[in-house]
Amino acid sequence: NNLWVQGIGGASFISGGNGTLYGLNVGYDRLVKNVILGGYVAYGYSDFNGNIMHSLGNNVDVGMYARAFLKRNEFTLSTNETYGGNANNINSSNSLLSVLNQRYNYNTWTTSVNGNYGYDFMFKQKSVVLKPQVGLSYH
């Protein structure tokens, strides 16, 4: 049994504006024979303040995953659903650019299904592992 928590954060400071991103991931997984089964919930918040633009985003993601180990082979399947709530504001006091002034909100939903395969190449008595992987995703 494994309960895990992961925090994310970042900031960007550029001449045209600045942005932030932060959030939290919480998940639980369990090893059953040679398979890890798990699920997670994630929340992320972002904002950007520019010269004439302000954007906010709230995202929630829920997913499940399974990873099977068969000798040196590793198979991973995952699926998730993501909701994004977004708000934008464009506002300029410049008479030429003021024709662009607007506010709008929109929501997005994204469903993803992913598969991945990896193979372990072990060197130096298994102290060094090279694992090339190939994956396929559908959104």
Image: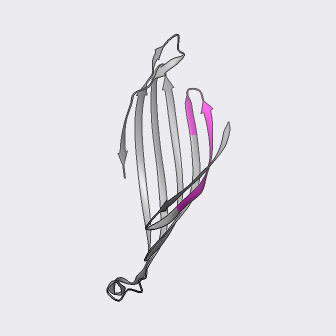
Tell whether position 26 is magenta: yes
Q: Nearer the viewer, residue 105 or 14?
A: 14
User: Eyeballing the image, is 31 above or below 51?
Assistant: above
Inspect this view and state whether residue 59 appears. Answer: no
User: Eyeballing the image, is 125 above or below 96?
Assistant: above
Residue 2, by quadrant, is top right
Name the residue at the front extreme: 15
Residue at the image position 44 percent from the left and 63 percent from the top: 109
Tell whether position 25 is magenta: yes
Magenta part, dominant SS: strand
Q: Nearer the viewer, residue 91 or 139?
A: 91
Residue 118, by quadrant, is top left
Mark count = 0
Coordinates of residue 83 in the picture (x, y in percent): 49, 62
User: Eyeballing the image, is 5 above or below 10?
Assistant: above
**Quadrant of the drawing holding the N terminus:** top right
User: What coloring was used for the rendering?
Assistant: one colour
Coordinates of residue 122 in the picture (x, y in percent): 47, 16
Residue 133, by quadrant, is top left
115 sits left or right of 18 in the view: left
The residues colored magenta run 20-37
Name the residue at the top extreme: 125
Coordinates of residue 19 in the picture (x, y in percent): 51, 63
Q: Nearer the viewer, residue 95 or 40?
A: 95
